[in-house]
Image: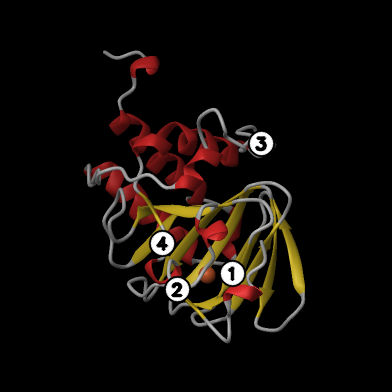
């Protein structure tokens, strides 16, 4: 039997899936957003059935913010479920498949691309394959501005580290901090401005999860703040 210190990459990824399942199953926000119970149910079923894939790892520059000597994420949290997700995320980071929304590389500035990325835990190409739900962890460096975008999937975000202002369409900007959530209906346009610390958010999608988010409006590179 292995000691925890000799955990393999496979073990760390399994722990991350379990942490996400625990986060969503029974989360108080599921009363308002039933989609969270659906995502939790799919994760729980995959754990019970051994239905995990382990896609080949892929690095992105932003992963440096999560683990290693240049990490900027404080893994401690006043919310136990958040701390468990952050700790398992950091432990698994070197063995995860880091990706970016494909269409963004041609549009967003290099500074954004060097400080943004995500891992899909469940969904297309995730640790758990699914065509009906998608969920994972996104990281954005301090001060980034994620311009207006939209997607056909219903979405819930939970802030796990740092802070972020959210905007719906041309509405006011609302600050969200650790433990808070934001829900978007399908095709509801939204934008984010990240605070003075690296931000980690857990996202969940249901519905039409096979269609990537796309930037909207007349977003030019000049309009994307650094
Ligand atoms: Fe979104």
Q: Residue at x 52, y 60 (%)?
A: 110
The disc, 3 or 2, on the residue closer to the chain's N-terminal end is: 3
Q: Residue at x 55, y 67 (%)?
A: 33
Residue at position x 57%, y 33% in the image: 70
Q: Tell me how far mark 1 sits from mark 4, CA to CA.
A: 15 Å
- Looking at the rendered image, the disc whose residue lies closer to the viewer, 3 or 4, is 3
Give the residue pinned by disc 2: 213
In screen coordinates, is 120 left or right of 224? left
Q: Position of residue 3 (x, y in %)?
A: 35, 13
Quadrant showing the N terminus = top left
Between the C-alphas of marks 1 and 2, the distance is 15 Å
Between marks 3 and 4, how big is the CA–CA gap?
26 Å
Dot 4 falls on a residue whose secondary structure is helix
Task: Out of 102 and 46, give the one closest to the viewer.
Answer: 102
Measured in 3D between alpha carbons, the distance from the residue under mark 3 to the one under mark 1, in whole angstroms, is 22 Å
Disc 1 to disc 4: CB gap under 8 Å: no
- Where's residue 163, x and y in %? 70, 53
**Location of residue 32 (image quadrant):** bottom right
- Callout 2 secondary element: loop
Q: Residue at x 66, y 61 (%)?
A: 226
Q: In this rendering, is residue 100 above or below 46?
A: below
Mark seen at residue 38:
4
* Residue 176 x, y percent position in the rendering: 71, 59
* Mark earlier in primary sequence (1, 2): 1
Query: Could you say which disc has been placed on residue 183 in the image?
Result: 1
On whether ligand 1 comes within 8 Å of the CB at mark 2, the answer is yes
Question: Label 1's element?
Answer: strand
Query: Mark 3, mark 2: which one is toward the viewer?
Result: 2
The residue wearing badge 3 is 77
Q: Earlier in the sequence, mark 3 or mark 4?
A: 4
**Residue 214 marker:** none
Contact flag, marks 1 and 2 (Cβ < 8 Å): no
């Amino acid at each position: 039997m292995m000691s925890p210190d000799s955990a393999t990459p496979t073990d760390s990824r399994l722990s991350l899936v379990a942490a996400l399942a625990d986060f969503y199953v029974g989360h108080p926000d599921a009363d308002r957003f039933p989609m969270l119970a659906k995502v939790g149910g799919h994760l729980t079923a995959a754990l019970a059935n051994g239905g995990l894939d382990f896609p080949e790892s892929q690095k992105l520059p932003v992963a440096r913010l999560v683990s290693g000597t240049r990490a900027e994420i404080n893994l401690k949290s006043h919310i136990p479920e958040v701390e468990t997700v952050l700790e398992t995320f950091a432990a698994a980071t070197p063995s995860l498949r880091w990706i970016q929304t494909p269409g963004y590389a041609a549009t967003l500035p290099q500074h954004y691309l060097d400080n943004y990325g995500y891992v899909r835990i469940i969904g297309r190409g995730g640790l758990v394959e699914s065509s009906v739900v998608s969920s994972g962890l996104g990281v954005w460096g301090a001060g980034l501005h994620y311009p207006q975008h939209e997607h056909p999937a219903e979405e819930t975000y939970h802030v796990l580290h740092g802070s972020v202002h959210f905007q719906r369409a041309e509405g006011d900007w609302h600050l969200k901090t650790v433990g808070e959530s934001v829900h978007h209906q399908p095709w509801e346009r939204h934008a984010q401005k990240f605070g003075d610390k690296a931000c980690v958010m857990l996202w969940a999608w249901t519905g039409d999860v096979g269609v990537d988010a796309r930037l909207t409006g007349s977003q030019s590179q000049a309009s994307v703040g650094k």
